[in-house]
Image (cartoon, rainbow, N blue to C red):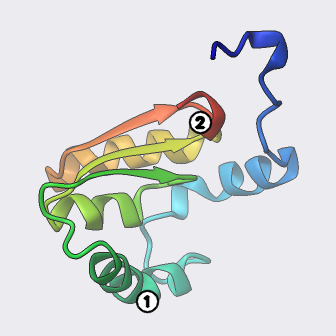
């Protein structure tokens, strides 16, 4: 079955959310910033995902709404081949810069889940 562009549903996105996270993007990797709770729970999220899938090593993973890449980088560090997607350009740029600093391989893309 072929889905034509006219039949494809619109991306599920809230422009206010994109704007909010874009405005905070420069603070994404600051563990004392508004993202502190995300940094603190990330080890728990990673362990939960790893347990659910029976180990991340060697798996292909897509992180939908990856933002600045905190979880995406952690999954890549656990051995997954990660693609991180988001519709907010600024957080993705932060993720790409952090990827250069960390040396972790993550394929970041500005694309909706519907188009990934």
Residue 76 position by quadrant = bottom left
Q: Position of residue 12 (x, y in %)?
A: 79, 44
From the image, tell me which residue sits under label 2. 89
Q: Residue furthest front?
A: 1
From the image, tell me which residue sits under label 1. 40
Q: Position of residue 89 (x, y in %)?
A: 59, 36
* Label 1–label 2 contact, CB within 8 A: no
- The answer to which of 58 and 66 lies nearer the viewer is 58
Task: Tell me the distance, in whole angstroms, between the alpha carbons under discs 1 and 2.
Answer: 24 Å
- The answer to which of 36 and 63 lies nearer the viewer is 63
- The answer to which of 8 and 35 lies nearer the viewer is 8
Q: Position of residue 80 (x, y in %)?
A: 20, 57
What SS does tag 2 mark?
helix
Residue at image x 53%, y 63%?
27
Q: Residues within 10 Å of mark 2 (few under 14, many from 20)?
A: some
- The answer to which of 71 and 51 lies nearer the viewer is 51
85 to 21, vertically: above or below: above
Horizontal side of 37 relative to 112 (left or right) equals left
21 to 54, vertically: above or below: above
Residue at image x 43%, y 89%?
40
Q: Position of residue 3 (x, y in %)?
A: 69, 16
Residue at image x 50%, y 42%?
85
Give the quarter of the figure containing the N terminus.
top right
What SS does tag 1 mark?
helix
Horizontal side of 48 relative to 113 (left or right) equals left
């Amino acid at each position: 079955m072929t889905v034509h562009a006219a039949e494809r549903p619109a991306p599920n996105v809230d422009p206010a959310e994109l704007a909010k996270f874009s405005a905070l993007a420069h603070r994404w990797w600051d563990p004392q910033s508004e993202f502190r709770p995300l940094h603190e729970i990330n080890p728990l999220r990673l362990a939960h995902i790893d347990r659910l899938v029976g180990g991340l090593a060697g798996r292909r993973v897509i992180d939908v709404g990856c933002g600045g890449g905190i979880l995406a980088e952690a999954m890549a560090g656990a051995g997954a081949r990660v693609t991180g997607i988001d519709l907010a350009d600024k957080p993705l740029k932060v993720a790409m810069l952090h990827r250069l600093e960390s040396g972790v391989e993550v394929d970041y893309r500005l694309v909706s889940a519907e188009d990934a």
